[in-house]
Amino acid sequence: MTKKPPQNFPEQPDSRHPIDDSHPTPDHTKPTLAQRIFRPIVIILFLGGYLAIAGTIIGFFGRWWWVLDLFANFRLQYTYPLLAALITAAIRQKWLPATLFLLALLINTSYIAALYQSQQPITATNLRPLKILHLNLNRTNNNTDAVVKLFHASDADLIFLQEATAPWLSALMDQTGSYQLELPRPRPDAFGIALFVNTKPEGNFKLRTTRILDMTPSAINIPAIEAVVESDDRVYSVLSLHALPPVSAHHSKVRNTQLHESYRWAIAQEHPAIIIGDFNATPFAYPMREIIYPSDPDAPNLNLAQQGQGYRGSWPAPFPAPLRIPIDHALLTPDLAITHYALGNGVGSDHLPLIVHVRSIANQSRIRP
C-alpha cells in the first residue's frame, strides 16, 4: 500500500491572537534617525583626531624639511580635535583609536605643560628692572591712538617697533611725550624698525649706545637694532630682531640663520643680553628648540621669557586666544630673570604687544620638557 506524500497546508492563524497588519514588525537592520545624524559626526571627529595625530608626528621631523617644521607650531591646537576624538572613541568603546588619540594628546600637552613650569629658585637682587616693550605694528594698521596709549601705559624704558614705516613714525613723533626716537630705519615693506627711548624714566636708567646689525646671510638687509643700556649701574645688551616668515625654503633658511646669529650675538656679549622680537617661530619649532635646549650640553643656553608664564599666543591677534600661536618672544642669557611678562591688548596689529621686565640675578637654570 503506497503512502501518499504529506500535503502542505497553510498555517492557520490562531483565532485567539489575531494578526494586526496595521503595525508591522520594525526592521532593526535599518539605522535609526539618531544613528543617521550622529554617524557623520563621529566620522568627522575621528578624522580630525587622525589628522591631529599626523600633525603631531610630522612636527618632529622639522630639521629635515622646512614644511614639516610648520606642523610643530600647533601643539595646543592639536589637543582640541584629539580630546574630542578621544571622548568619542571611549563612548563608542573603540579602544585602539582611543589609545592612539590619548598618546598623541599626552605628547602635545607635555609641550604645553612645560611652559607652565617655573624656573628653578633664583636669588634675585633689588636692582631696578629694565622695562622693554616690543610691538610689531603691522604696516597696514592705522590705529595710532591705541599705539600711543600703549606707549604711555607701558612705562617702558625701551620700545622697539617692527614693520615701522615712514608714515607710522611721522604719526607717532608728536605724540610720544617723553619717548625719543633713536636709530629709525623705516621701510615700505614689513621690515622697517625703530627704537623709542624713555628720556624721563623712574630710577637710574640711560642709553649708552645703539647700532644697526644684520643677522641675515650674505647681507640680505633686514635690520636689527642693538641697544646697550645702563640701569642701576648694571649694563644690558638688547637686540630687537624681526625674522623672516617661513613661507618658503629660502625664507625658512634665512629665518633660521637670523635666529642662530642672534644666539651667537647673545652668548658673545660681555653684559647680560636679551633678544626680543617677532621670531616667526614658536618654542616648539626646531630652530627655537636648538637655541633654548642645545644638543651640546656644553653649549650656552638662552632662557625663554615665556617659561613659567604658560601658553601665551601673540599671533594672529584678532583670533580667540586658544587659536593664537606664540611667535613674539624674548630670550635671555642665564644671568637674567623675568620680573614681569605680559601680552598687551590689541592695538589694531595682527600681533599683540610683548612687555617684559628683566634684571640681573645670582643664578639661573633651564627646564627641558
Image: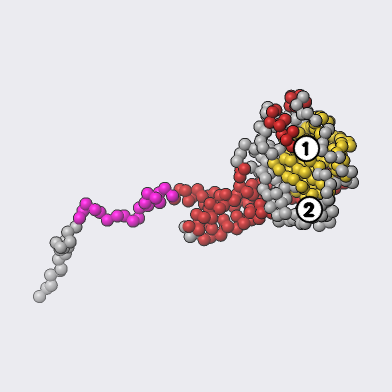
> Is 26 inside the magenta-drawn segment?
yes
28 is higher (above) or lower (below) than 317: below
Helix, strand or loop for the magenta stretch, by majority? loop
- Identify the element where label 1 is drawn: loop
Q: Residue at horizontal 61%, vertical 45%?
A: 322
Q: Residue at horizontal 37%, vertical 52%?
A: 31
Question: Would you call the spot at circle 1 few (<14 residues within 10 Å), some (14-19), or many (20 or more)?
Answer: many
- Identify the element where label 2 is drawn: loop
Say whether residue 318 is visible. yes
Return the residue nearer the eye: 241 or 251.
241
Q: Position of residue 33 (x, y in %)?
A: 37, 49
Q: Quadrant of the N terminus?
A: bottom left
The segment highlighted magenta reads 20-38
Q: Which residue is mark 1?
A: 156
Q: Residue at horizontal 77%, vertical 44%?
A: 357
Q: Residue at horizontal 37%, vertical 51%?
A: 32
Q: Position of residue 62 (x, y in %)?
A: 70, 48
Return the residue nearer the eye: 102 or 161.
161
